[in-house]
Amino acid sequence: MRTNTAETDRTAYLFLLPAVVILGLFLIYPILWSFLASFRRIGIAELAGIRLWTQPGEWVGLDNYRSLLRSRIFWTSLRNTAWFSLLFIPGTLVASLGMALLVRKGLRGVSVFRVLFFLPYVVSIVAAGLAWRWMFDSEHGLVNAIVATAGGTGPDWFGTPALAMGVVALMCVWRWSGYFMLIFLAGLEGIPTSLYEAADVDGARAWMTFRRVTLPMLRRPMLFALIVLLIRAQNVFQEVYVMTGGGPGNSTVTTAFLIWGTAFRSFRIGSGAALSYMLFFFVVMASIAQIALLRRARRLR
C-alpha cells in the first residue's frame, strides 16, 4: 500500500515538474532578479554578456529609490495615475452595474445585448486604441465631425492636457465594462427573490430597493471589482502608448508608462525596477485600504 502511494506521489510530482519549471523560470526568477536589480545601477552596457545566474551593474543600495523620490516626472506620473483611477474605476463600476441591471430585466433580444456589451473586452487593446484615436482625432475624427454637423467646433482632444486623459479613461471604461457586467450579473442572479418580494410588500420604491437590497447583496462582487480595477488602473500602459504616447506635455504619463520609458527607452534598468516595486507597494497598500474601508462600512450597517 505504501509502495503504491509513493509511486503515485512520484507520478504526480513528475506531472507537476514542467509547470514548476515554467513558473520558476518565467515568474519567480524575474521577480527576484528585478528586486535585486532595483538596488543596482544597470545600463545597456552592463547587459552585454549577461548570464542567467549573474547580476550585472554596480551596487548602489537605495540610491535608485531616492532619485525617484526626487524626480518631478515620478510625482507627475503618480498624479496622472490617480486622476486616471478616479475617472476609470467609478465609471466602469457604474457602467457595468447599469448594464447588468438592464440585461437582467429579461427584455426581448437581451442575449444580443449581452454579446454587444461584452464584445469590447475581447477586442485587442491596440486595435481599440487606434480606433478611438481616430474617432477623437481633431481634424478627421468621427466625434468632431458630429460636432461640426451640429454647428459646433470640436476640441483638440489629444492636444489638450485636460482632455487627453479623459479620452483614455473613457476608452478603458468602454472596454472593461462588459467584463464586470458578467461579474455583477452573476451576483444579481444569486440574490434571493424573496428579498425583492418583501421589499415590494413593504412598498419600497425602485431606488430604495436598489439601495437597501441590491447593493448590500453585491458586496463581494463589488469588492472583487474594486481590487481588480485598482490593479488595472495602476498598470495602464498599452492604451497610453497607442493613443497619446504620454503627451501632451507628460499629461498622460502613468506610472506603468514611466516604468517602460525608464527601463526600455532610457535603458536605466535599475531605476525602472525600483519604480516597479514602488508601484507594487502602492497597489498593495491601496488594496488593503479598500478592503478595510469596505469591512468597516459593513460593520457600521
Image (tube, rainbow, N blue to C red):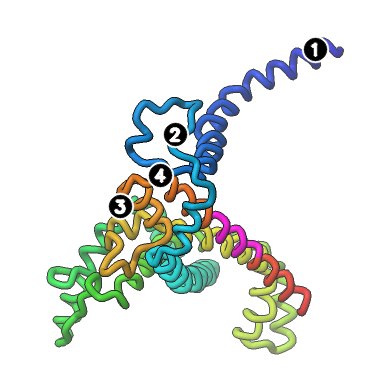
- Percent x, y for residue 121? 41, 55
Q: Amino acid at mark 2?
A: Pro
Secondary structure of residue under mark 1: helix
Q: Earlier in the sequence, mark 3 or mark 4?
A: 3
Mark in the foreground, 2 or 3: 2
Q: Which residues are magenta?
A: 280-288
**Label 4 or label 1, whichever comes before in sequence order:** 1
Going from N to C along the chain, the mark reached first, 4 or 2, is 2
Is most of the magenta stretch helix, strand or loop? helix
* 265 relative position to 31: left or right: left
Asked whether residue 246 appears in the rendered view, the answer is yes
Alpha-carbon span between mark 2 and mark 1: 48 Å
Marks 3/1: CA–CA distance = 53 Å
- Residue 81 to residue 149: above or below: above
Q: Is residue 178 visible?
A: no
Q: Earlier in the sequence, mark 3 or mark 1?
A: 1
Task: Give the amino acid type for the residue marked by disc 4 in the picture.
Answer: Ile
> Which mark is in front, 3 or 4?
4
Q: Earlier in the sequence, mark 2 or mark 1?
A: 1
Of badges 4 and 2, the one in the foreground is 2
Asked whether 282 falls inside the magenta stretch, the response is yes
- Which residue is under mark 3? 126
Q: Count residues near mark 3 (Cα–Cα under 10 Å), then give few for <14, some for 14-19, many for 20+.
A: some
Residue drawn 64% across the image and 74% down it: 215
Q: Residue at x 53, y 70 (%)?
A: 97
* Circle on res. 4: 1
Q: Which mark is residue 269?
A: 4
Q: CA distance from mark 4 to mark 2?
A: 10 Å
> What amino acid type should be assigned to the residue bearing mark 1?
Asn
| Residue 188 placement, left or right of 168 | right
Residue 56 marker: 2
Is 114 a magenta residue? no
